[in-house]
Image: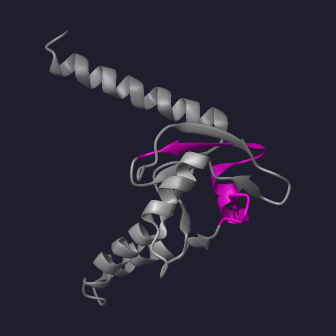
Amino acid sequence: MSQFLGTHQNRLDAKGRVSVPALFRGALRVLTDESVPFLVLRPSLQFDCIEGWPGALFRRLSNAIDRVDPLDPQQSDTATLLFADAWPVEADREGRIIIPEPLVEHARLVEGVVFMGLGDTFQIWEPAAAERRRAEARERARAKAAVGSGAP
């Protein structure tokens, strides 16, 4: 499997370590290029969660930004947002990663964490916030479906 699918809950230990779900580790093995970090974590710009990017995918995104004029202020802003708070991490033998403290604070993680698959990437959430996010997404999808179906 080369996509991040499903929602998985794990425990964050006192050292900031958490086990990456086995299905996600399998996807990372398929998607990771040995010349780039195993995984890149960064704070979401949209939500109070952490984004998880396979190293190879993050590298492709980086290459796209590199093709833009480096003197363009928008390129500089994009590069700052993308790279300044990014953390390359590798899993240990047990499949655990250490989530850097600034990211733990951003996502308001305490003990439990939820890994939410998003296809090519995934997110790491505080459990109650993850449930709210999923509920909001379902509600927006239902509302959009109702509008599209001609229902009042």
Instruction: Give the residue displayed 39% in from the left and 54% down from the top.
Output: 120
The stretch of residues the image draws in magenta is 91-118
The answer to which of 72 and 97 lies nearer the viewer is 97
Measuring from the top left, give residue 79's x and y in whole percent.
Answer: 41, 77
- Please state the total of marks drawn on the protein image: 0
> For this view, does 65 lie left or right of residue 79?
left
Residue 141 is drawn in which quadrant? top left
- Vertically, is 146 above or below 46? above
Residue 151 position in % (x across, y down): 18, 10
Horizontal relation, residue 44 to residue 77: left or right: right
**Nearest to the observer: residue 136 or residue 24:** 24
Up/down of 58 relative to 145, above or below: below
Q: Quadrant of the C terminus?
A: top left
Its colouring scheme is one colour
Residue 74 appears in which quarter of the rendering? Answer: bottom left
Please say whether residue 48 is visible from this viewpoint.
no
The x and y percentages for residue 72 are 27, 84
Residue at x-position 13% and y-position 13%:
150
> In the image, 149: left or right of 92?
left
Pinpoint residue 51: horizontal percent, then vertical percent. Answer: 52, 56
What residue is rendered at 45% in x and 74% in y?
Answer: 33
Residue 19 seen: yes
Q: Is residue 17 magenta?
A: no
In this view, the residue in front, 2 or 74, is: 2
Q: Which residue is rendered at x = 72% and y = 53% of the image?
A: 18
